[in-house]
Image (cartoon, rainbow, N blue to C red):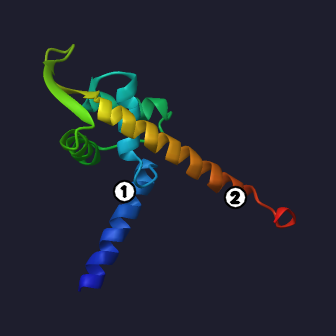
Amino acid sequence: MLLLQFYKMRVDMRDETKEKGLVPGTLHMLILKILALESMHGYGIGMRLEQVSKGVFQVNAGSLFPALRRLERDGLIRGEWSVTKNNRRAKYYSLTAQGRAKLKRETRDWEAQTTAIARILQASLGEL
C-alpha cells in the first residue's frame, strides 16, 4: 500500500514537472530572479516566468503561491498588500537583502552545474 502511494506520488510529480517544463528544485530560484528585476504580485510573477521563458515555463497557482509563502517565511522575499492597476487588492512581493544573497549563490551553483552537465553531454570517447 505504501509503495503504491509512493509510486503514484512520483508519477504525479513527474507529470507536473513535465507539464510545466521546470527542472525540479528551480522554482524558488526563478521566482527570486523575477523579483530581482522588479516587485510584483503573484499572478504577475507567474506571467513573467512564462513571458521570459517564451512559454516554456508555465507555473500554476497551486505551485506558485505555496512557493511564495515559503520564500516569505524564510525571509527571502517580503510581501505587502496593495491595490493593482485594475483596482483590486493583491500582495506585492519584493526581494530582501537575504533573498538577493541567496539568488547570487544559487545562480553561481546553477551555472557551475549546467556547465558540468554540458561538458558531460558533449564528451566523446576520444576526449577521455
Residue 116: horizontal and vertical position, in percent? 64, 54
**Image-quadrant location for residue 60:** top left
| Badge 1 or badge 2: first in the primary sequence | 1
Q: Quadrant of the N terminus?
A: bottom left
Residue 59: horizontal and vertical position, in percent? 35, 43
Residue at screen point 47% across, 30% down: 52
Q: Residue 121 bears which disc, if any?
A: 2
Query: What's under tag 2, amino acid-wise?
Result: Leu
Real-space Cα separation, disc 1 to disc 2, in angstroms: 25 Å
Residue 36: horizontal and vertical position, in percent? 38, 27
- Spot the residue most to the bottom: 1
Of circles 1 and 2, which is in front? 2
Residue at screen point 37% across, 40% down: 102
Up/down of 79 relative to 57, above or below:
above
Please tell me how crowded label 2 is: few (under 14), some (14-19), or many (20+) other residues with Cα within 10 Å: few
Q: Is 40 or 73 nearer to us in this picture? A: 73
Residue 56 in sight: no
| Residue holding disc 1 | 16
